[in-house]
Amino acid sequence: MRLNHHRGFVCLLLFVALGQALGQAADRPNILLIVSEDNGPELGCYGDPYVQTPVLDRFAKKGVRFERAYVPQAGCSQSRAALLTGLYPHQNGQIGLATWKFRLYRENTPNLIRSLKQAGYRTGIIGKLHINPASAFPFDYKQIPSSNFSRKKLGDYAKRAAEFMGQDDEPFFLSVNYPDPHRPFLRQVKGLPKKPLNAKDVKPLPYFGIDTPELRQQTADYYNCMSRLDSLIGDLLKALDRSGKRKDTLIIYMGDHGADLLRGKRTSYEGGVRVPLIMQWNGRAGFADSVRNELVTTLDLMPTILNAADAPLPSGLAGKSLIPLLGGETKEWRKYLFTEFHLHSAHNFYPQRTIRGERFKLIQNLQPDTVNPGYGFTMNRFFAGLQDVVEKSETIAPAYSLMRRPPEFELYDLKNDPYEFRNLAGDESFRDRFVLLKNQLAEWRKATNDPFLNPKNITRLQAEITASVRNGKPDKKHLNLNYWNYFFE
């Protein structure tokens, strides 16, 4: 009798423990992370008057839209590595494109995928990872690993997602990475969008500062890519609905950095680092029908996701969870937000550090009064003949001249000059604001152990890049990098 009673008691304990574990698992949401490539907040829900994005506009109405969201660096590999490690590029090592041999300092750097797997999540990725080494991110499921800029079999993104989401009952993390609207700006693919825009239908993005027929056509086709992206995200959300798991899923949509247009991608201007960020989590306070104006960064997503998953956070993360903020538990948020630039490929090494507050923004150029190679790279590659138009414009020519050969500091009043055309760094009436931001930027660089505080590191990396030049252009085959071994000597 006593033995049977003991067995029954043990079974009861096991049953209770199992029930608690199942309850905890049910409380942990699935996480669907949707990442688009090379677009800022050019969406209808962000106020763009021309683009057609009905799916994301409806998604935003039922979620929370962050008006001022930023990536740490306006580059594909750099942004994605920062998102998945929770660290700035200068902290994790992915300071340039993975396709140009740039990489994390250490493969064992803590990251989101490892943390979620340890917490019992199934993990999957559809689309490119674009971080070195890929082995640092042990996804359980991988599909469509190429960049797919030719936009082949776009319907497979939703099909593969449905396959993954329907496999098991344990909570999942799935990252879906679309190629649109990366260049080439394909006007239409397999009938998407159904009604493409033409040059006569649009005006260029306002942060260009100029308007030409060519810019209108490029802008129209950029918008067409955005519209196609919107349709594909609609297919993905329908697949999630069919899985029956939408009500248990935290959905995050973001762009990896700004558009590959003038003053966008590969710059520290707002057109490069400001991105769309929209989240939905059914039934959670703060995640429905709201717009937030706090300064947030995609570095906040790793702690947010781990917070939602009830998983421990690695030490030293650069961001902080958005969940307490949205739930009203956080009284104060950050006053300053930081971004940076190193290079994209070996064509455009031009290190910068940036701070912005509520109104003012300061860019520090670490190789001042030298020509920024990124300027010619963008102009010559995509905008042949546009330099003549720029030089003829008395109002905009100074801003483009400054972008080509920047001084050490650029100070902008984003309230009165949201597109950063007028540098106030030398204006004595803004001296106090300049000094404050300069000091705050210097403190952040020290606190995050910025390797470029040592000018020798800039010189040494510049020499490695210069040594790769053949026939006037960097050659990937001859790029021999070693920065991960000497940045922190």
Image: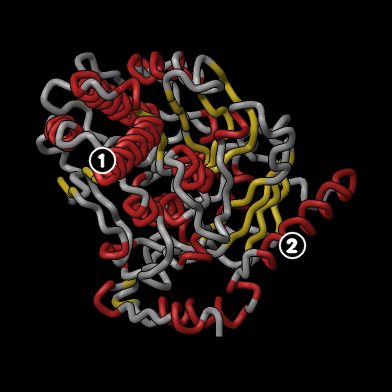
Going by the numbered disc 1, the residue's amino acid type is: Met
Residue at left offset 74%, top offset 62%: 443
> Which corner quadrant of the image does residue 182 belong to?
top left
| Badge number at residue 443 | 2
Q: Camera-side residue: 302 or 278?
A: 302
Going by the numbered disc 2, the residue's amino acid type is: Glu
Residue at left offset 55%, top offset 60%: 315
Disc 1/disc 2 C-alpha distance (Å):
71 Å
- Is residue 348 among the parts visible in the rendering? no
| Vertical arrangement, residue 198 with respect to residue 348, above or below | above
Q: Is residue 210 left or right of residue 4?
A: right
Callout 1 crowding tier (Cα within 10 Å): few <14, some 14–19, many ≥20? few
> Which corner quadrant of the image does residue 309 belong to?
top left
Where is residue 17? Give x, y as percent.
36, 40
> Which of the marked residues, 1 or 2, is nearer the chain's N terminus?
1
Disc 1: which residue? 1
Q: Camera-side residue: 36 or 271?
A: 36
- Is residue 256 among the parts visible in the rendering? yes
| Vertical arrangement, residue 304 with respect to residue 229, above or below | below
Kind of element beneath mark 1? loop
Where is residue 284? Give x, y as percent.
49, 22
Residue at left offset 55%, top offset 18%: 290
Q: In this view, does 444 lie to the left or right of 204?
A: right
Tag 1–tag 2 contact (CB < 8 Å): no
Where is residue 52? Give x, y as percent.
35, 17
Choose mark 1 or mark 2, whichever is in front: 1
Callout 2 crowding tier (Cα within 10 Å): few <14, some 14–19, many ≥20? few
Q: How many marks?
A: 2
Where is residue 288? Give x, y as percent.
50, 17
Kind of element beneath mark 2? helix
Q: Residue furthest front?
A: 1
Q: Is residue 342 left or right of residue 181?
A: right
